[in-house]
Amino acid sequence: YLEEYELAQECRDLISSLPKERGWLATHLYRYQGFWHNSRQLGGVLGCQQHFQAQDTDVLLVTTPKSGTTWLKAIMFTLVNRIHSPVTHEHPLLTNNPHELVPFLELKLYVDTHIPNLTSFSSPRLFSTHLPFVSLPKSVLESGCKLVYLCRDPRDTFVSLWHFTNKLRPQSHGTTSSLEEVFDKFCRGVSLCGPFWDHVLHYWKESLSNPEKIFFLKYEDMKEHPQLHLRRLAEFIGCPFSPEEETKGVVDDILGLCSFDNLSKLKVNVDGKLSSGEENKAFFRQGEVGDWKNYLTAEMVDQLDKIGEEKFYGSGLKL
Ligand code: A3P
């Protein structure tokens, strides 16, 4: 408890020294190591930076918010545990939201300067984070821990984030925030773990120089060729599908279990809540590519394109 107390104190001191801006909800966002976080999350960031000990067999799922984290968690959980939890009518995903099965470091395990006991996790352990590359706990880079990075077209990411934020807004805070207002913040980088482009670019570069360590995936590619990318993921984490599994159709079983249609209709995801309070259904909206067309003006699209071109110039990355 002393450690938690000291961490909370350190976090308060840090917060009072950081640049801040009004966030998308009523709370402020603070810029730490070049990226924006809310105050609860900052406690978690410091906590996992100082206390999380990665193991060589860990797999860390990294995403920017609303890039398809829920889907990736479901897929990776099912993939990694498929031997002792095969896809049957008793699979843990049928009664648990993916966020309960693969917890966030800074948003769940270490949130609010809590220091968790992780001894009950058996290897290979699966965790997730929205942390930018510069803020990852040191042990993640120093160990053999592998990273799977998932990102998404900024236009769809932004629209998804706008919907999600409006769902989280307590009723008492009244109306939804205007799309224009938060669009401006998003473009200036002021969004949870933004700037979006810097987040993606850094992982992209690292994945190029260290492909054994970081697997880089786009939501749109996963949507278009799910079998291909699931097989690549299995190889990346060192458990490729065996010929017997291929014959039995395990690839399609996993994709079917984790599909938007299947997960979003399960009772747990229709009326359940996370232990942190969010309604599970907030994580399932549409699950499609290109919904931005229904929300963004031509000027907004131009603006996002321009930022992407500038930030990604010369990197070979296009989103
Ligand atoms: P939309 O708001 O565009 O529908 P995250 O999981 O990172 O919070 O991202 C949420 C987005 O992923 C939402 O996008 C959500 O609908 C979509 N999503 C959730 N589960 C999915 C699944 N099983 N397959 C595809 N997309 C999914």
Image (tube, helix red, strand yellow):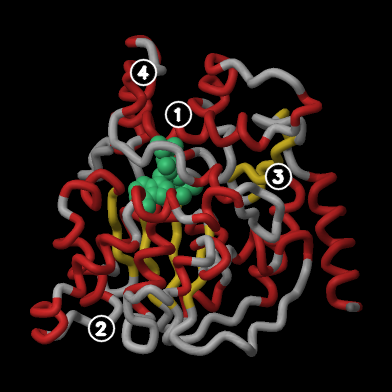
In the rendered structure, the answer to whether residue 163 lies left or right of residue 61 reads right
Mark 3 vs mark 4, foreground winner is: 4
Spatial separation of the CA atoms under disc 1 and disc 3? 20 Å
Quadrant containing the C terminus in the rendered view: top left
The quadrant in which residue 207 appears is: bottom left
Q: Quadrant of ligand 1?
A: top left
Look at mark 4 in the image and give the residue it sits on. 294
Coordinates of residue 157 in the picture (x, y in percent) = 42, 36
Report the quarter where the N terminus lies: bottom right
* Rendered view: 175 above or below 235: above
Q: Is residue 250 above or below residue 195?
A: below
- Measure how far apart labels 4 and 2 are at the Cα level: 40 Å
Residue 186 in view (yes/no):
yes
User: How many labels were placed on the picture?
Assistant: 4
Residue 159: give its label. Answer: 1
> Any mark on residue 239, and which?
2
Name the amino acid type tagged 2: Cys
Q: Secondary structure at mark 1?
A: helix
Q: Earlier in the sequence, mark 3 or mark 4?
A: 3
